[in-house]
Structures are given as C-alpha cells and as structure tokens.
Image (cartoon, rainbow, N blue to C red):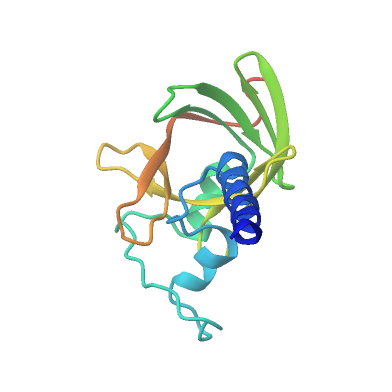
Amino acid sequence: MRRMILPLAVVTGLALLWVLFFPDDLSTIDGPDLERSVASDKAPAKPMPSVTLPTATLTAKEVKKLFSGRSVESQTVIKQRRSLTYYLPDGEVRQLRNDNKRFGRWRVSKKGRMCLRMETLREKCRIIVREPDGGYRKYIVRKNGDHQPTVDYLQFWDGNEPGL
C-alpha cells in the first residue's frame, strides 16, 4: 500500500506544479493545435474539434495591415492593464506596460492568428475581431465556442509614435 502512495503523491505534485506554472485554461486551443483545429487543406493527424469563429474575425492579411509598423494602445480585459506597443514589420515587438519596457516577437499565422511571444514566455496565438462598435478585440479561442476576450485595442498610430 505504501509503495502505491508515494508514486501517487509524486504524480499529484507534478500535476499541481503544471497548473501553477502553466495556468492557461486547458480547454484553450493555442499555437499549432489552433492551426490544426480550423479547416485546412490537409486532414489533421489527429481529430480536432471544429470551432466556430466570430464572423468579424480578421484574416491574416487584415491582421498584418492593422499591426505591422504601427503602435497600439491596448488594455487587458480582466486586469485593466494599459500598454503601448510597437509592432515592427520585421517581427520585433516593443512594449511599455506599468513603466516597464518589454520586448518580444510577433507574427501572423496562416489562419490569421496574432502570435505573440514576450521575452521568456511561450508563444500565444489569438484571433483579432472587429467589434460592432468599430473597435478591435483579441480573443482566446475555446473549443466550446465560448471565446474569451483578453485585450481591447484602444488606438492605433502609424510608426513608433510612443518612441519605444
């Protein structure tokens, strides 16, 4: 009996560490899984759920045009953190949030997802949606179709307006 308790405690501890260090909702489709989950020319290696996206989801071309070479003022939906971000055409991203400068990389996937990797964090790919009021919002794609808004884009400028 004791021999079984120790391995179970180790597995439970590892699972707890995983949740603490990777707190993203496990029902999220992200990165490569997101790419395979939406209709493609090739059948996925493993079955992925079909996901319905909002009708005003931007295409890859629209996302590139909206962000490339532009500065953006944004605010996170939950914590209301404001940021100024400059998206360089070469894929570099510079951000000022809470008086701290952050750096990273950005790209747009073939399916139109804005993929962002800040410093040592993992890459996250999200959809950009034009809202009925004309504004733009970033969403986490959920398998169940209940997509979670994460960022509101408040203003766009051409070039590096904030001087980041």
Is residue 45 toward the left or the right of residue 119 in the image? left
Residue farthest to the front? Answer: 1
Work out whether residue 88 or residue 139 is closer to the camera in this orientation and state it: 139
User: From the viewer's perspective, is 142 left or right of 4?
Assistant: left
Q: Position of residue 101 (x, y in %)?
A: 71, 22
Question: Looking at this view, is 12 or 65 the one in front?
Answer: 12
Q: Residue at x 26, y 36 (%)?
A: 133
In terms of depth relative to the viewer, which is nearer, 136 or 40?
40
Q: Position of residue 131 (x, y in %)?
A: 30, 42
Q: What count of labels does the image hold?
A: 0
Task: Tell me the quadrant of the picture where the C terminus can be found.
Answer: top right
| Position above or below: 131 against 49 | above
Residue at the extreme top: 99
In which image quadrant can residue 32 be found? bottom right
Question: Residue 63: x percent and y percent?
Answer: 51, 51
**In the image, residue 42 lies at what x, y percent?**
53, 85
* Residue appearing at x 58%, y 60% in the figure: 1
Direction from residue 16 to residue 25 in the image, left or right: left
Q: Is residue 97 above or below residue 15?
A: above
Res. 164 in view: no
| Residue at the extreme left | 132
Figure quadrant of residue 98: top right
96 and 23: which is toward the camera: 23
